[in-house]
Image: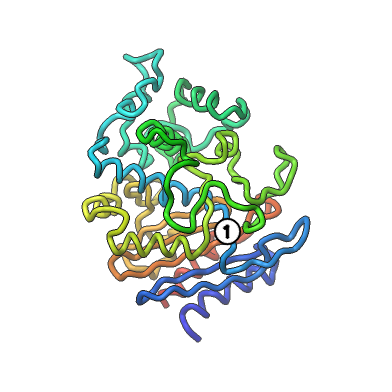
Amino acid sequence: MTQFDRAFAPIQAAIDSACIPGAVLGLLEDGRTTVRATGHAVIEPERVAMREGTVLDLASLTKVVFTTTAILRLVEQGRIGLDDPLTVAIPDLRQYDVAGAAERRLTFRQCLAHATHLPAVEPLYTYGQDPQTLRAFILQREWRHCPPAYSDNNFLLLGIAIERLTGLTLAEQALPPGFTFRPDPADCAATERCSWRGRVMRGEVHDENAFAMGGAAGHAGLFGTAAALLGFARAMMEGGLLSPASIAALRTEQNVIQGVRRGLGWQLATPGWPAGDRCPAGVIGHTGFTGTGLWIDLDNKRAWALLTNRVHPSRHTESGIVALRRVVGDALHG
């Protein structure tokens, strides 16, 4: 039995026990990509099999695959500096309190590293669904002060900064092959049966705030396949996405939140983290609420992605995703 087979076995067991509907496991090793799917992409209103090429809602992988990469590219181009305040790109941020607003002092580095006072998450969608009005509300809101936390709101602001700097909405941005903010629902795995939207979400972003902002935001909205994520990892390894200086910066510890070491956007290897405890110390990774995850070993040119639709048809069940990620990661390094 190969390492890949050993890693796939607990995934199949989780599906057989109805903990998750379906999954795709991808591994990039020695320049070769292996992808295997199992279970169902949809179980209601009808059953649809999960395929190797099924497109999944990547949720917070948007933060690292898209937003972090886009910000670091803008730094490389000299458009911004990591320690510049967000107001370089968003001069109207808290524009009615120019002298006193703490938000006007937030930097790109602080937002990437989740080293701000912003709360982890806010139900912004409850304030309305007009994307432009909601963006204006986010920019003028006086945010309550919280201890530094892993926060969607940091990346909401970074997403707006990218739009301002490029003159393009996030949905219009160029993306690596296999990624999209506007997927064909027929190609997608389903996520939740949403009580707010009154339907099973398929091909529409699961995250409520990203949905209200038009489907694409700095923290969520990206869709893609396991092969696309491994292609992204390969490009990172080969220097096709970011400069060596940017790679070094995102791998440098910036902050420790709730016991997790964080670089710029990415999680860094930490005891007890989702990649398991057997992976090399230089691995970077990230997870997504819908049940997704990507980990990249830049030193050994190795990467793996575990994509599940664990919130389908409801987030309010115990999927075992936390333990499953760790078991899979350990098996791939056993």
**In the image, what residue occupies the spot 41% across and 74% down?**
333
Instruction: From the top left corner, tell me how far across and down residue 205 is, in percent.
Output: 59, 45
In this view of the protein, which residue sits in the foreground, 166 or 282? 166
Q: Of the residues shown, which amino acid type is indicated by label 1?
A: Val
Q: Would residue 318 be visible to someone looking at this image?
A: no
Left/right of residue 227 with respect to residue 256 in the rendered view:
right
In this view of the protein, which residue sits in the foreground, 107 or 325? 107
Left/right of residue 11 with respect to residue 70 in the rendered view:
right
In this view of the protein, which residue sits in the foreground, 266 or 240? 240
Left/right of residue 300 with respect to residue 198 in the rendered view:
left
What residue would you read off at disc 1? 55
Q: Quadrant of residue 232?
A: bottom left
Q: Would residue 100 be visible to someone looking at this image?
A: yes
Instruction: From the top left corner, tell me how far across and down residue 81 is, in percent.
Output: 24, 36
**In the image, what residue occupies the spot 51% across and 72% down?**
35
Instruction: From the top left corner, tell me how far across and down residue 295 is, in percent.
Output: 41, 62
Height in image: 55 above or below 171?
A: below
Q: Secondary structure at mark 1?
A: loop
Height in image: 165 above or below 299?
A: above
Left/right of residue 197 with respect to residue 58 in the rendered view:
right
Instruction: From the top left corner, tell me how far across and down residue 188 is, in percent.
Output: 62, 57
**In the image, what residue occupies the spot 76% across and 57% down?**
44
Height in image: 269 above or below 165?
A: below
**In the image, what residue occupies the spot 54% across and 61% down?**
307
